[in-house]
Structures are given as structure tokens and as C-alpha cells.
Image (cartoon, rainbow, N blue to C red):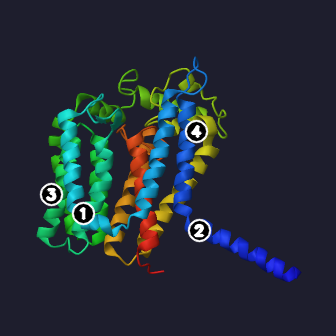
Amino acid sequence: MQRDGVLAQGGRVNRIRKLAADHRLETLAGLLALVGLLLVFSASRSSLQRGISEVFVKQAVWVAIGTAAFFWMHRVNYRAYRRYGAALYVGMLVMLIGVLAFGSGRAGRWIVIGGFRFQPSEFAKLFGILSLAGYLAEKDPRRPGVFLGALVLAGIPFFLIFEQPNLGTAIIFVLICLFMLYQQGITKRQVAGMVGLVAAASPVFWLFLEEYQRRRILVFLRPGLDPTGAGYNLMQSKISIGSGGLIGKGYLRGDMTKLGFLPESHTDFIFCRLAEEFGLVGVTALLVVYYFFLREVLAITASTRDNYARLVGTGVLAMFFCQIAINLGMTLGLLPVAGIPLPFLSYGGSSLVVSMMAVGIMVNVRNNATMLF
């Protein structure tokens, strides 16, 4: 009887372990969103404010919307997106053109509908992944016509995003497409050709950059160039990160935000808030969670037999990896400030909802695609 009880207990433990293993990706995403909500709450409080801020309430609403989007996307069979790839692509272009025509906000990157403000360029990344994966799934990009077609499909939304202006998201969009083309087997000559094209076009793009974008690049090259203007956030970012030390100052005790030294600490510079309040220990913990999150996306991508699913997974992996790398790079001064949110953590509904949608798609791939192992 006692042995049967032990076996039953062992069976329950194994079922719990299997359940945890089956839901690692969404569990990690939920954990990151929760951490982001706590950091936004902390970063949105000033030295004169007590209680709950409007910024925190809005982010909590977006977390709820993102959660609903995740559950919706994880129930829709991912193969449906392949059938409607053309419609997704056209819808993406309509949204991006709509921003140029009716955009609002500081840089005209948002569209307001019924009191809700969303950023179409964030959704364009996911729609671009789904539509480009559908185009490439049964084609060989080493063929010049196919390769050129992929460049055109990626180039049109790139220029529309660049024109908003939103250089950071435009760069992310290009990197996603390059990862997907590489996954599909483009040649080294094609890679070299694209690198050469980008290098040759750089002087032309420089001419079309906004003045503040040029200043950000110049400040990156010469950090002390404009300490009270374009270089202010970067300088304060480094101070905030360094002040956290090993274990940080403690939750809600970060001085940089309370005293107003880092105005963007709840958006693109949310990492600084984490480093200041939780120190190197907190930063390491975040990087570990991100590592396991990316590893789960990679594992799902690598284990599927469906080439379309593999391409979608490659695009999603590239989207998250590039955003994490660029955001951390810019807050540490290793890259120019580019206005890239940190996935799941930064304040902003569009980025959070798109991230949750992408996780939902990957969970659906895991549940429905034929796996190699």
C-alpha cells in the first residue's frame, strides 16, 4: 500500500514536470511580462507621486490585451497564416501607408482608433514574418528571381517604416528578413552582395536621416559631444546602471527616475531601472530568463519538419534576439540609441501585444506541427 502511494506520488510529480516542460515558452513570456509590469510601476513613480500612476494602469490593460491575444493566436492553426499571407502583407502595407497619411504622436508613428493608440510598424514585423515565410517556404532563394522577389517584399515595408521616421524598427525588419533568407539557404555571394549594397547605400540613407537621428549616431561615435542634448539619456543610462552595483538599491528605491534624471526609464531604457534597483544580480537573472526563452523558440523551430513553420520560427527568433541585443547595446553605449523597446518589459502596448501574439504562434507550432523529435 505504501509502495503504491509512493508510485502514485511519483506519477503526479512526473505529470507536473511534463506539464511544466510543455508550457515553458508561455511561462517564461508571462514571467517577463510580470517583471515588466513591476518595473513600469516603479519607473512611472516620481519623488512627488504616490499610489498608482496612469502609465502603470495603461500597461496593465495592455498586459491583459496581450494575454488575450496570446490565447487567440495559440488556438488558430499556424497553417492558416500561410493561406492568407498575401492578405496579411497587403494589410501591413495599408497600415504603414495609413501612418504616413494620418499618423499622430511625436514622430507620427501611431494611429489612433477609438481612443486606442497603436504602432503599425510593430505589427508589420510579425505580419512581414508570416508573409515572407509563405513566399519562401517552397522556393529556392538562390534563384535570382526568387531572391529579388524576397528583397522587394521586404524592401517596400522597410522604406515605409524608414519614412515615418522609425530607423530602429526598419533595421530590425531588415535583420529579420536576412535571418529568414539565410535559413532558407542563400549563398555567400548573395550575403556579400547585400552587405555591399547596404554599405554603398549608407551615405544616401545618411542624407535622409532626421537631424535627431544623425545626432544620436554622432553622439555614439563621440559620447561627450552633446551631454545635455542627444547624449543626455545615454549618459544618464550609464550612471543609472553603474549605480546599481552588485545587488542594487532595492525595489522602488531607484533615484534616477524619482529625481527625473532619466525621463525614458519606463520605455526604451527600462533595463536601466532593473540594473539600478536590482544590480548585477538582477541583470544576470533577466539575461538567464531571456536565454531560456530564446532557447525554447529555437528548440521549437529546429524540431519542426514543416519548412513554413521553421521559417516563421526563424523570423520570430530573429525579432526577439535583435530587439534584446540592440536595446541592451544602446543602453550600455555599445550601439547608437535607436528607440527599440525591450521585449515584454518596456512600456508600450503595440510591442507587448505583438510579442504575445508571436509567442502564441510558436506555441501553436509546437502543438500542431510535425516534429523531428
Q: Quadrant of residue 187?
A: bottom left
Which numbered disc, 4 or 1, marks the residue that appears first in the sequence?
4
Q: Is residue 370 left or right of residue 253?
A: left
Disc 1 designates what residue? 84
Q: Is residue 31 left or right of residue 209?
A: right
Q: Amino acid at mark 2?
A: Ala
Label 4: state its secondary structure.
helix
Residue 321 in view (yes/no): no
| Outermost residue to the front | 114
Label 3: state its secondary structure.
helix
Which numbered disc, 3 or 1, marks the residue that appears first in the sequence?
1
Residue 54 in view (yes/no): yes
Mark whose residue sits in front, 3 or 2: 2
Q: Amino acid at mark 3?
A: Val
Which numbered disc, 4 or 3, marks the residue that appears first in the sequence?
4
Whole-percent x, y for residue 264 in the image: 45, 30
Q: Amino acid at mark 4?
A: Leu
Which numbered disc, 4 or 2, marks the residue that appears first in the sequence?
2
Q: Residues within 10 Å of mark 2 (few under 14, many from 20)?
A: few
Disc 4 designates what residue? 38
